[in-house]
Structures are given as C-alpha cells and as structure tokens.
Image: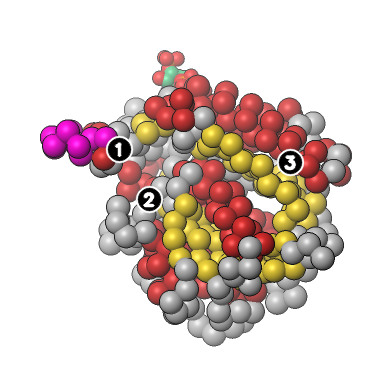
Amino acid sequence: MTRVAVLAGTGSAVPARVVTNEQLAGRMDTSDDWIRSRTGIAERRMVEPGTATSDLAVAAGRRALRSAGLHRVGAVVVATATPDYQCPATGPIVAAGLGLGEIPAFDVGAVCSGFLYALATGSGLIASGVAEQVLVVGAEAFTTIIDPTDRNTAPLFGDGAGAVVLRAGDPEEPGALLGLNLGSDGLLADLIMVPAGGSRQRSHGNVAAPEDHYFTMRGREVFKHAVRRMEESSRTVLEQVGWQLAEVDWLVAHQANIRILHAVADQLRLPRERAVANLDRYGNTSAASIPLALDEAAGRGLFTPGDRILLTAFGAGATWGAAALTWPDLSNGPDLGNGPALSNGPGLSSAWELAAAAMVGPAQL
Ligand code: COA
C-alpha cells in the first residue's frame, strides 16, 4: 500500500498584543478605511520585545501535539522567514523547547509559501521512512523585519504560528495529503526582499543602512503574480489528484489580502464563502498563515471529516504552491483546553481560543 502523510493534529498561537488600524494611522499616513478596503485587514498581532519566532512555534507545536495525542514525533520542520538567529536554524530550538529529544529538526525558507514547502518536506520524510510522525510548523515574528513607519508594509503583516502533525498513513484515510505542487522563479527575487543581513550585503564588508534590514515589496506586481500562480498551482494539484473544482469543499489560501483571496476563488470559480479567511484579525503572517487559518477553522468546527481541502500560497522568491488533502477525523478534537495546563510563555494565546471567544463558543460547536 502507498504510504502517505496524514494530518493528525493542528495547533496555533498568536501574541496577545493587538495592533489596530487606528493605532497605525496614528503613526503613519494611512487610515482604517484605506487598510480595510484595500486589504481586508482590521488588526494584527505583534510580539512583545523579547519574544521570538521559536516562542510562538513552541506554543503552536505543543497544541498540535496535544491535538494529535502525541508526546513524540520523528522530526520537526519549521517554515519561517524570521528565524530567531541567522545561525543556527530555529527547528532544533523548537524541538528542544518541546522536549522532543535529539530528533532531526531544521528550517525551510520559502517565505509566504513556506508552510507548503515544509508540508512537502514533512511528507517526504514520512514517505522515505525517515520519520513516522513529523511536526510541521509555520511561525513568524514578522513585525521584527517591518519598518514600523512604512505604510506600504506595516499595515499588511503580523506575527503568529500554526502547526500540524503529520503521521504515516494510507491515501484512503481522511486527512491524507494526496497531492502537492511547488514552483519558484528566482528572476523575481527582488520583488519582495530584505536587502541586508545576508552574504550578498555582508561580503561587501560595509555596514548596511538601517532601512536595508527592513522588508521591501513591490505590492502591485506581487498582487498579480500571486493571483496567477496560486490559480495555476491549484489547477495543477487538482488535476494531479483527480478532483473537479466543484468537488473542493474549502479553499485555505495564504492570507495576504482579501482581494487576492477573492480573486483566486473567482478565477477557480469557487464560491467566495468557501475561501477561509482570518486575515481581518491577523493580517499576513507569512509562513504561519495557512496553518493558523486551518487550526482556527477547525476550532470553529468548519470542517467535516472527509471534506476536500485545497491549500495554496505565493511568496517571496518568488515561490508558490498548492496542496490537496481531505480533512481528518481528529478524534481528540481541536485543542479545547481540557488537557494539562499549557505553559505558553509570556503574552501568547491560542488563536482558536481567541476566535472562539469572539465568534463561536465551544458549546455551540
Ligand atoms: N495608506 C494609504 N494610502 C496608501 C497606503 C496606505 N497604507 N499604501 C499605499 N497607499 C496609496 C499609494 O501611495 C497610492 O497612491 P496614489 O494613487 O496617489 O499613487 C494608492 O494608495 C494606491 O496604491 P496601490 O499600491 O496601487 O494600492 P493597491 O490597491 O495595489 O494596494 C497593496 C496595495 C500592497 C495592499 C496591494 O498591492 C497588495 O496587497 N499587494 C500584495 C501584497 C502581498 O500580499 N504581499 C505578500 C504576498 S506573499
């Protein structure tokens, strides 16, 4: 029988600090109305000083492990564009933070497509027999690379983490990861970039200008590439797994901009209400956005076991991808807070608990 990766648990965590559009409008030339109408974003989360990506990743990872009913996995893959350090990778720090022992743990860098690349990596570790279970995390302290006064980027991005546990299983099981498509075009590397801090800048031996350590983006061009690549990649993966578009129950796309999300849904002729959206509350959390959206939607009881889910993302690189999976029967249910007390670290909360408080309580699920 074919051995595939099967989704066995989900978790997420976001910093407690909320930054509203009004707060941003107080320090740059923008407005709540502009940000909402052009992006769909109302607020985002921001780490407190001293909180790093691995703190968010550990909190999300702990919840995903608990949701899967596991204390151990065979490997950890962390997708991030904002690692704790340039060296070492964040993966081993996360594995140690979760008490997972001396297992393989490393990072994948594909920025906003990072979670799909990490999912492919985790799935490959399972298919090759290297690991029976893999914790795949997308985590970002993205605001640490954003110029807090730049109206082109500060309204768009936020911090957070999402995680899934993959386990070895068979393609017929609910939760099976049935297909993946990935792509890149390095000719577009300068479309989205942090110019300083890497070997290109450092090899010159000059100290970089402070602003070169911040994230830059040509937003309008990114918009067009993002819609086209996510549509194409989605169509490719659907063809690969033999699903018709009409058979897709949920589109969980990278949460960058509600207009991008709707454009992708429209191009694919999927009803917009089938496109899961939480960017109004978190903005673009880069590699964290898809697992955060998955965990939150699962917590709200949106998915039924067996539902056909299409994931897609576009990010710096340029990179893009799509994945097709069915929704698992998570017998433990989402993280309802019934297990042992969580030690989240300062100022971290479960995205699902926040969402549940705001939108639908556990009793209504
Ligand atoms: N507040 C107020 N005005 C702003 C603004 C802000 N935060 N940012 C830009 N503007 C202005 C521009 O200066 C421009 O003014 P002008 O018409 O006088 O020149 C006007 O608003 C329109 O700017 P434009 O860039 O055309 O807006 P847009 O509709 O393309 O929206 C983005 C800008 C960045 C929101 C949008 O292009 C986008 O979401 N791109 C994709 C970004 C993304 O998702 N990146 C990550 C992908 S992984």
Q: Amino acid at mark 1?
A: Tyr
In this rendering, does residue 46 appear at all?
no
> Relative to 72, does residue 330 appear above or below in the rendering?
above
Q: Residue furthest bottom?
A: 340
Q: SS of the residue at dot 1?
A: loop
Identify which amino acid the numbered label 3 is placed on. Answer: Val
Q: How far is the residue under mark 1 from the one under mark 3?
A: 34 Å
Q: Secondary structure at mark 2?
A: loop
Residue 23 drawn at (x, y percent)? 37, 42
Q: Is residue 170 visible?
A: yes
Q: Is residue 207 left or right of residue 12?
A: left
Query: Depth-wise, is mark 3 or mark 2 nearer the camera?
Result: 3
Q: Where does the magenta region start and end? A: 200-209
Location of residue 47 in the rendering, given as x and y in whole percent from the top left corner: 36, 56
In 3D space, how far apart are the residues under numbered discs 3 and 2 (Cα atoms)? 28 Å
The residue under label 2 is 82
